[in-house]
Image (cartoon, rainbow, N blue to C red):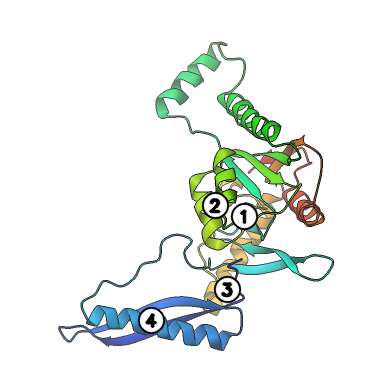
């Protein structure tokens, strides 16, 4: 997993080819120490400055190509003490479960166009629609999962309804998030392409544990980790207090059933227990 404990920001200052002062800053990380992270970020900032001064375009990292700058909140270990999952706080403030070998499947439903939404509104208004489009999308997505499991005896997938689709947790075995076979399975199950790309780049499977702030009447967090000063720390504490008060009224997903053999690897069981507890998937709450 590309989950780092230490982060540091570095800046390199110099002059442009025209003699004007310039400065480039970047973040880098390390699992060893803050010193190691700081040395890495200074070297990276220097490389960017050197490229600029030489007239070359600085390198730009694509989404997911470097570790995500997220605060580590908790770690999950197996019976031998090996880390099997890490809980982090993401960019906008929600908690995320990063699993090294337990596969999460992220299936988003297609969004309605403005025209479709208008037609559906009037159809409901005049009693012509007995159920919302989301139910049809859910049935179609679930049917796809059922077909896959039927074609692959021994598989077992727990399914959950999220605010925008379905989430699956594969429990019968463990998987390498970097392998072509794993990525192909995610595609066949209908996973979001961006999620598949992120799994490969970050070398883990990810699932959001707490609601998205805007879905529970709050704004997204704007204070990036690591917090750089006292003013930013105060702002984050205020944001967090409001967010926690808001998201208590919501669940992140709802358990809808299990498809397959019923088998569960011990590592998958441990991850499922944490996931189900934090997401509140068995409670009768609105999804956010």
Seen in the picture, residue 36 relative to 119 is either above or below; the reply is: below
Residue topped by disc 1: 206
Q: Which residue sits furthest left?
A: 18
Task: Determine the CA span between mark 4 and mark 3.
Answer: 25 Å
- How far from the left and from the top, in percent, is residue 35? 55, 88
Residue 45 circle label = 4
* Residue under numbered circle 2: 180
Q: Kindly identify the residue that appears in the image at 81 percent across and 40 percent down.
A: 262
The x and y percentages for residue 227 are: 55, 74
Q: Residues within 10 Å of mark 4 (few under 14, many from 20)?
A: many
What's the residue at 61%, 63% (across, down)? 89
Q: Which residue is mark 3?
A: 233
Quick check: marks 1 and 3 in contact, CB under 8 Å?
no
Drawn side of residue 21 relative to residue 158, left or right: left
In this orientation, which residue lies closer to the viewer: 147 or 56? 147
- Residue furthest right in the image: 79
Query: With respect to residue 48, does 92 lie above or below?
Result: above
Distance from the alpha carbon under mark 4 to that under mark 2: 34 Å
- Mark 3: which secondary structure? helix
Of callouts 4 and 3, the N-terminal one: 4
């Amino acid at each position: 997993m590309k989950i780092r404990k230490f982060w540091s920001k570095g800046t390199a200052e110099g002059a442009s080819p025209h003699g004007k002062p310039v400065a480039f800053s970047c973040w880098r990380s390390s699992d060893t120490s803050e010193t190691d992270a700081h040395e890495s970020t200074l070297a990276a900032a220097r490389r960017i400055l050197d490229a600029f001064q030489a007239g070359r375009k600085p390198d730009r990292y694509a989404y997911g190509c470097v570790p995500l700058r997220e605060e580590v909140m908790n770690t999950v270990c197996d019976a031998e003490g090996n880390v099997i999952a890490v809980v982090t706080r993401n960019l906008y403030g929600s908690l995320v479960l990063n699993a090294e070998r337990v596969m999460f499947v992220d299936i988003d439903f297609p969004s309605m166009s403005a025209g479709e939404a208008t037609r559906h509104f009037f159809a409901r208004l005049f009693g012509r629609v007995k159920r919302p489009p989301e139910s049809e999308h859910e049935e179609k997505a679930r049917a796809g999962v059922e077909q896959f499991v039927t074609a692959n005896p021994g598989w077992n997938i727990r399914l959950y309804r999220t605010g925008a689709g379905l989430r699956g947790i594969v429990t019968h075995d463990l998987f390498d998030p970097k392998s072509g076979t794993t990525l192909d399975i995610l595609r066949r199950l209908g996973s979001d392409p961006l999620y598949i790309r992120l799994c490969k780049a970050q070398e883990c499977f990810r699932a959001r544990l707490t609601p998205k702030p805007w879905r529970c009447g709050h704004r997204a967090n704007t204070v990036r980790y690591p917090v750089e000063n006292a003013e930013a720390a105060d702002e984050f504490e205020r944001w967090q207090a409001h967010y926690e008060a808001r998201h208590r009224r919501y669940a992140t997903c709802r358990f809808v059933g299990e498809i397959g053999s019923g088998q569960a690897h011990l590592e998958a069981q441990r991850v499922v227990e944490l996931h189900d507890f934090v997401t509140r998937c068995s409670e009768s709450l609105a999804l956010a």
